[in-house]
Amino acid sequence: MKKDHETARKFIDETLKLIVEKGGSTDVNLREISKRIGCAHTSAYNYFENYQDLMWSAFEEALKMYAHAITHNLHNRMNGYEYYTCLINNLIHFGLEHPGLYRFISTDPINAKELPDHIITMVVAMKKYVIDVIATLSMGKIDNTEVLNLTDILIAYIDGETTAIVTDRFLPGEDIYTRILSNCIRIFTLFTSTSSNGIDLKMVRKEDLGKDYPELTI
C-alpha cells in the first residue's frame, strides 16, 4: 500500500492526534479520522489494507516516539548512576507527558497474534537496548539470565507504576516519581548483590565500564 503518500501520512498523523486527545485508541474510529482530514473514510483504503493496518502504522510511529524519548539526553560521558537514572526518568516521563500514546502502546487492547513482524522487531530492539544497558552497568557481576530477569522486573515495575499514574490510581500528594526512581535503584542493587552489598551506581564511573553504552536503533 502507499503508506508514504502525503494523504497516508495525514491519516497516520490525525490518528495519533486523536489518540492523544482521547487519552488512548479505544474511542478512535476511521470516520472521525477521515472527517478531520476532510475526505471520505473509504479513501483510507487507497493507502491501507484496512482500519487495523492504519492503526498498526500509527502504532509504529508511537513506538518511534517512545524510542526517541527513552534515549533523550543519554550520552557516553555519564557515569553509571547518571545514565541509569536518566534512562529510568525517560521511561517514566514518556507516560506522564504522553498518557494517550502510552495507553495506546502499553494498555489498550490489541491482538498480539496479529502484530506485524516489523513492529515485533522494533519492540524486541527496544527491550534489547535496556538489557544491554543493564548488562553494561552490572559489569559482569550477574550472568545473562539474571540480566534478563532484572530487565523484565524493572520494565514490569515501571509499566505498572506508570499505568497507575496515567489512570490516576495514586494517593494525592504522593511523590510517586521519587519513589519509583528509588525503587529502581534498589532493585538494581539487590540483583547485583553477591552477599549483602550490590553495585552502588553512584560509584560506577564511565571508565570503570570498559566500553561505551549501547545504542538503540529501530
Image (cartoon, grey):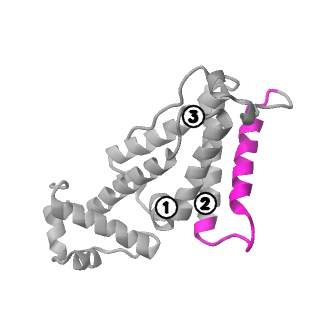
* Residue of label 3: 133
89 vs 42, nearest the viewer: 89
The answer to whether residue 144 is seen in the rendering is yes
Q: Which quarter of the picture shows residue 111?
A: bottom left
The tag earlier along the polypeptide, 3 or 2, is: 3
- Is disc 1 in contact with disc 2, using a CB cutoff of under 8 Å? yes
Q: Mark 2 highlights which residue?
A: 162
Q: Is residue 47 above or below residue 128?
A: below
Question: Badge 1 is on which residue?
Answer: 102
**Residue at x-position 32% and y-position 75%:** 29
Determine the main secondary structure of the stretch shown in magenta. Answer: helix
**Tag 1: Cα neighbours inside 10 Å, few (<14), some, or many (≥20)?**
many
Q: Secondary structure at mark 2?
A: helix
Residue 45: image quadrant is bottom left
CA gap, disc 1 to disc 3? 22 Å
Task: Give the image location of residue 12, x and y in percent.
Answer: 28, 63
Residue nearer the viewer, 204 or 47? 204
Amino acid type at image mark 1: Tyr
Q: Earlier in the sequence, mark 1 or mark 3?
A: 1
Q: Which residues are magenta?
A: 165-194
Compared with residue 31, is residue 137 higher up or lower down, i.e. above or below?
above
Taking the magenta stretch, the answer to whether it contains residue 42 is no
The quarter of the image holding the N terminus is bottom left
> Are dots 3 and 2 in contact, CB under 8 Å?
no
Which element carries disc 1, helix, strand or loop?
A: helix
Task: Say left or right for 73 vs 160.
Answer: left
